[in-house]
Structures are given as C-alpha cells and as structure tokens.
Image: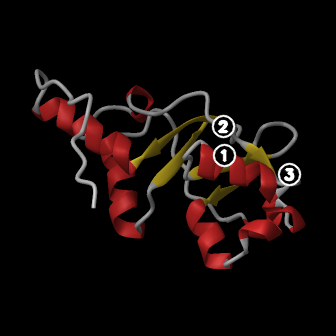
Amino acid sequence: MMNARLSTIMTENVTTVKATESLDVVKTLLFEKHFHHLPVVDDKERMVGILTSWDLIKKDIRFEDYGKYIVSDIMTQKVVTLGPKELVGAAAMIFLKHLFHGLPIVDDERKIVGIVTTHDILKHQFKKEYPNDVFVKETNWINN
C-alpha cells in the first residue's frame, strides 16, 4: 500500500512565495486560505526554503507586526524534499522520523512539482482500505 508513487497522491499547482515577500502576504495565505506549508522559490522557481505555520509560531511575532518582516527572515532553509517517483512509504518514513507534516516534491532542477502532507497519506491509505466507503459531506459538530 505504501508502494504507490508520490506523483499519484501529491497536490500539484502548489502556491509558493518569494523570499523577499512581506509576511503580510503569508498571513493571508496561511490564515485565510488555511495553508500550512508554503515553499519558498527564487526567481527561476527553484526551491530555496519553506515557510510553515510552525515557523511563525516559533518566532512569536505579533500579528500586527508581520509587515515588518519578509519571508527570508522566518523561513526554514534546510528542507527535506522528495521526487515525484519516490514511494509513498518514503514520505511516511520521513514524517514519522522527523515529525514533519508536509514535504515539497521537486524535480531534478529543484522546481516544485507538488507537495505531499500527512493528510494526503492518511487519505490514500483510507481509500485503499475502504475503496467503496463514501466520505461524509457534513460533519455534526457539537457546539459548546
């Protein structure tokens, strides 16, 4: 089940940011669009880092001060990546070993071709185990 290629489960057309962009741009993407991982690319669209919601939490920057910072001030530069032909199991192993939740998928030129998250792997495994199960469209939430 973990022998599928990452290209079969990855999200394509990944939203990226430049290292020189203001954190105000990032704030919109992370908090309004609910992204948790934003690959950072250079002018040739090659990956140079990643900015995650966790990076922002670690820095403890006040929301109103985001305009004072740019992406390169906060981003993680040492990033684990995989290629689209790698196996789902390789991503799962990295997630478990390093407690990551998202892996950029890059080509041989370090250009982003996709991203895989722990949610993607969970969804993939669920569909393999329960191929005929219908996902519930609405969830009943208990309001306190």
Q: Name the residue: 69% across, 37% down.
A: 111
Residue 129 is situated, as x and y percent measured from the top left of the image, at 11, 34
Tag 2 and tag 1, C-beta contact below 8 Å: yes
Q: Quadrant of the C terminus?
A: bottom left
| Residue 15: mark | 2
| Circle 1: element type | helix
Name which of mark 3 and mark 2 comes first in the sequence: 2
Label 3: which residue? 21
Mark 2 is surrounded, within 10 Å at the Cα level, by few (under 14), some (14 to 19) or many (20 or more) other residues, namely some
In the picture, the disc for residue 134 is none
Q: Nearer the viewer, residue 57 or 108?
A: 57
Foreground mark, 2 or 1, reads 1
Tell which of 65 and 74 is nearer to you.
Answer: 65
Which residue was labeled with disc 1?
29
Q: Amino acid at mark 1?
A: Leu
Residue 33 placement: quadrant: top right
> Would residue 21 be found to the left or right of residue 59 on screen?
right
Residue type at the position of mark 3: Glu
> In the drawing, does residue 48 fall left or right of residue 117?
right
Instruction: Determine whether the residue tagged by mark 3 lies in a helix, strand or loop.
Output: loop
